[in-house]
Amino acid sequence: MTRSFLFLLASSRSDGNTELLARRAAEQLPADVEQRWIDLAKHPLPDFEDLRHDTDHARPTDGATGLLFEATIAATDIVIASPLYWYSVSGQAKRYLDHWSGWLRTPGVDFKATMAGRTLWGVTALAHEEFEVADPLVGTLNNSAAYLRMRFGGVLLGNGSKPGDVLRDTQALARAKTFFAQEAPLARFPYETL
């Protein structure tokens, strides 16, 4: 399968530090790798309603839900570009991941089997210089990938608060040059052993 990247911008600010860092990393992808960018603020998902046990399910086709469902199952690589908001992913990113629960029951699409083997990546900018504070964000993405038996490429972390700050983080920019070139291992829950 030819690689196809879906970049999900999950910030409340356009052209913020997280997006700038994600775009720097994406510049390093080969020219023949498809890139699709979707700004979740411009395509907001409705709040997720858990109807697993009390309704029939239909394939989402309309609005942001249909757009994001189709883009997700078409991608080999999904990049969640979310700033660190209160030590985890943004509300937009969390809402997107919540919708995966509904997509697991979409008729005619075995979402879990479809996503298995694909790769989830993260990009985030944070105001802290101590990157350990982003561990809850990393855990959210890793565990989501592990549940679907996806690969997890990790999270590209950069430092920045004011617009453009991340462009002065030379270490983050250096990591961005090779971030998507690394081999992503199969995601595992913390309690799993190799």
Image (cartoon, rainbow, N blue to C red):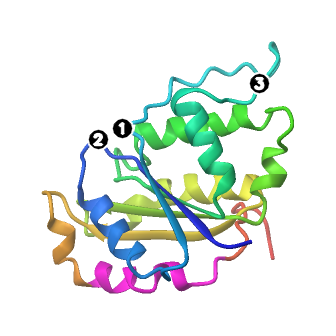
In this view, the residue in front, 58 or 168, is 58
Which image quadrant is residue 76 in? bottom right
Magenta region, residue range:
171-184
Q: Amino acid at mark 3?
A: Ala
Q: Earlier in the sequence, mark 2 or mark 3?
A: 2
x%, y% of residue 42? 36, 37
Q: Amino acid at mark 1?
A: Ala
**Residue labelled with disc 3:** 58
Frontmost of labels 1 and 3 is 3
In this view, the residue in front, 43 or 113, is 43
Q: Is residue 110 above or below residue 29?
A: above
Label 3 residue SS: loop
Query: Gap between marks 1 and 2, in whole Å?
Result: 6 Å
Residue in view at x 80 percent, y 49 percent: 112
Residue in view at x 74 percent, y 71 percent: 1
**Residue labelled with disc 1:** 41
Label 1 residue SS: loop
